[in-house]
Amino acid sequence: MAAASWYHRDISRVVAEELLARAGRDGAFLVRDSESVAGAYALCLLFQRHVHTYRILPDDEGLLSVQTIQGIQAQCFRTLPDLISTYQHPNNGLVTPLLYPVHRARRAPDEDSDGEDGRGGHVATAVPAMVGTWPSAPITGRTHIPQQLHQRLQEQVHSSPASDFLGFLAEYLNHHVQLDPEALHLGHPQLRHLGTTLATACRALQGEIDLTLAGLEMLARVFDPPLSPRSPAREQGLLPSDPDLELLLHKISTVNNLLSSLEKKVLKSLQEMVSRHNLALPSVAVAPPPSAKPLAVQSFEVKVGKSQRVVLMVDVESGTVTITKRGSGSPEEMIPQDKILQLIKYQSVQNKVRLVCARESQKSLSRDFVFPSARKREAFCQLLQLMKIQHSNLDEPELISVYVGTWNMGSTPPPRSMASWLTSRGLGRTQDETTACIPHDIYVVGTQENSLGDREWVEFLRASLKTLMAIDYRVVTGQDIWVPPRAQRQHISAGNKGAVGVSFLFNGTSFGFINCHLASGSEKTHRRNQNYSDILHSLVLGDKRLGGFDLTLRFTHLFWFGDLNYRLDMDVEDILAHVTKKEFQALLAVDQLSLEQKKNKVFLQFSEGDISFPPTYRYERGSRDTYVWQKFRHKGVRINVPSWCDRILWKSHPETHVVCNSYGCTDDIVTSDHSPVFATFEVGVTSQFVPKEAPGSGPEALACIEWESVEVILKTTSHSKCYIEFHSYCLEEMQRSGENTFQNCDIPGFLKLGWSSKHLPVLNPILPDLEYLRDQHLLLSIKGVESCESYGECCIAMRSMIGSTAQQFETFLFHRGEETGSMRGLMRVRVPRDRCSTRERLYEWISFEEEDAEPVTDALTRPKPPPQRPRSRPRSLPEPALGYTNPAYFIFEGVP
């Protein structure tokens, strides 16, 4: 089965159709795995420019049969080759017999990897199946060989890279191929001329086989000298270069036998030695499981005040920060981690930070430090954050680090080392060398056009991470995904590309990851948008109870990445000029993905790190100095402008903690025409909350969620009455409101609905504790009374709604990736007084602040309270007002 060249395994339907279209002859066929039925196959057959697909289904006994036209009795076969052999004959229920198998073939190394119209993903060759015997009449010349066969074989030679081996084959095709059928007709048992050609072409292989065989024989004689097999070639004194194909096959068979028997031979010999001489094999100590390398003490030279320079030394293992004046041998001050109260990053000065520390007295010390670069400041902050985490007394983490990488590998094997990719080094916003080798908690690696098998690729990545981080990461599910347990994986095809998704629950925080490959071509923006929509519609991930909600709302944090294939709408000469000058903002202004996001066509409310690295596609393979933007096709020259095809985006619930610490690409991995892209994130997670007072230990004090009013505007021509569904992990079950009490459809294309407090339910969370409720979210869905179909969904954070007075909220409504309306209202979350205790999260001690006019340096001050976290609102909207903040709905406020 595995050797059948017409079996293309799990290629998509579209790829199969493209391969057959390239073959271009009636009767061309291939077999692939079925996309709809596990364990089944799809037989794809070309006839009159249409691809006919027949499902090959196994029965309960494992017998295979083809679903053909009605009236044709199904035939059963034990193997797939037997089935294909039968259907190569006519009158078996197919539109045409199987005549020309389309063979698997590697894509040529210089082929572009964008997969456009099937010309970049695979290279297929189609030759007729040579079944049966040669004709009985004598063949006197080349003209008696079928012309199509000769022409197709010639195309194979001329379309392949030049080599000595192909030179021998060309000689055979041009001068000797017609002689073998004559010899067969005259009674010769073999294809003599073909055998001579292959033996001559394989002379180099003869030498390699001899060297390998000699080494294996030497090893075998060590353990079993009398029985060591010897090559017949040596006994007969044949030269290694003797062009005898039979000898070569015998040598290969001998090597195969030696390799398969050597392990048993060595084991048996060792066992006999132990028993005969009463020996004991040396014991092998079991190595302890690998642990992370201890972090070395890191030093940062910084400026204090106007001119003074000091050295900050961060020792994560001991939990201290030491301040030493430059040139001084003794430290000026040593600060334990538990005395560091706050770390304030200045936004106007990207390389400046303020450290607030506790003193024995009631006062505290605040000091400002200016680093050589913003990257050094970020490295210092990351080390202090890691120090806080390692020395905290928490049973479960509150902050984890996530690595996300995407790479279109261009159907070529990866290089031996991928250290720059996995440690976020290269171009753009990269990791500083002091933090690059700090292991992340989760690694998510998405690839496209990966030529390696799943197991081979996974083991390669595991070994790479173990070498770099000294940690043996566990692969739980899915190719290229490293995640905790309780994970869910699904793959779908979208157009001529596809997507794979993984979701899991990390304590009380849900994660989703989607790796995709969208349609290619500068002019295919609409098709890429449709691919995105198809993925949203088809990918089934997350909690099944939330299946009716927009996919992007089902997770606390959703990361979407891959070869999105969006291009730059600019002439290639202008693009190259901007790239040379590193004028990336001018290019981002014509970036299709950014433009489509602004139009609310795709990736609504998704975020992306700042792009400060050059376009990652289309490079000349083997270099990162040259973009190859011309592709020569049989239809003409196609232009592939340099573009940021490879992207990493994310979307999180409002008022959650997620910070992108790096976003860039490598500059030393050159095997593909795409550069690998990486991003790292600091993500806040919630623990499985355990209340201080066990339920039932006393009178139950309930928290409650109360609504004063809700107002909704829908983009719809429907006049249906609606109700609201309320979902949350903090509720025992879904709740719903009554029908809307107010309705206005005076504005064409819009429906305005309203609910009063009497028609909105009071919700009681399962736990009343403030520390628990401030991390919870509510998912709301607006549904029609008659159809029960959703008109839009949204997510509301409870953190800002907690208090004794009602708070205003406003948010967009989404459905299937599109904005469908807006919701606003007043609500409050009441918490019992005895359940109002809370604590600062580990990620809350770092804050941001604008530059002070006169920053205080080395002065004793009380620590500034952390700035209030702004309530999360739809991006790019002004601050809340009495009216709608979305300009699309100003018409309801009387604004023209």
Image (cartoon, helix red, strand yellow):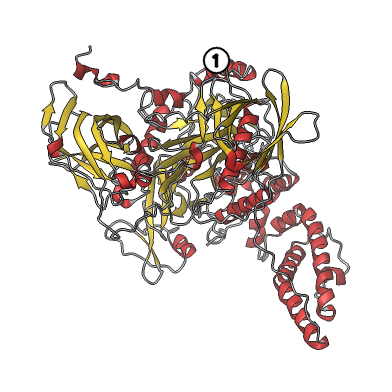
Q: Position of residue 78 (x, y in %)?
A: 44, 69
Tell me which amino acid carries mark 1. Answer: Ala
Q: Describe residue 694's horizontal placement relative to residue 430 as left or right.
A: left
* Depth check, front residue: 671 or 133: 671
Q: Label 1's element?
A: loop
Q: Position of residue 70 (x, y in %)?
A: 27, 58
Q: Which quadrant of the structure image shows residue 358?
A: top right
Residue nearest the viewer, comparing 761 with 888: 761
Q: Is residue 311 left or right of residue 846?
A: right
Number of numbered discs: 1
Q: Residue furthest right?
A: 237
Do we see residue 383 in this rendering?
A: yes
Q: Residue at x 45, y 58 (%)?
A: 88
Disc 1 designates what residue? 853
Which corner quadrant holds the C terminus?
top left
Q: Residue at x 28, y 58 (%)?
A: 698
Front-most of residues 271 and 569: 271
Residue 769 lies, in percent from the top left, at 34, 48
Q: For residue 494, which quarter of the picture? A: top left
Q: Is residue 94 left or right of residue 153?
A: left
User: Residue, x 37% and y 57% (percent of image)?
Assistant: 37
Is there any visible trace of residue 107 in the rendered image?
A: no
Q: Is residue 846 shown above or below 508?
A: above
Residue found at the very far top of the displayed protein: 896
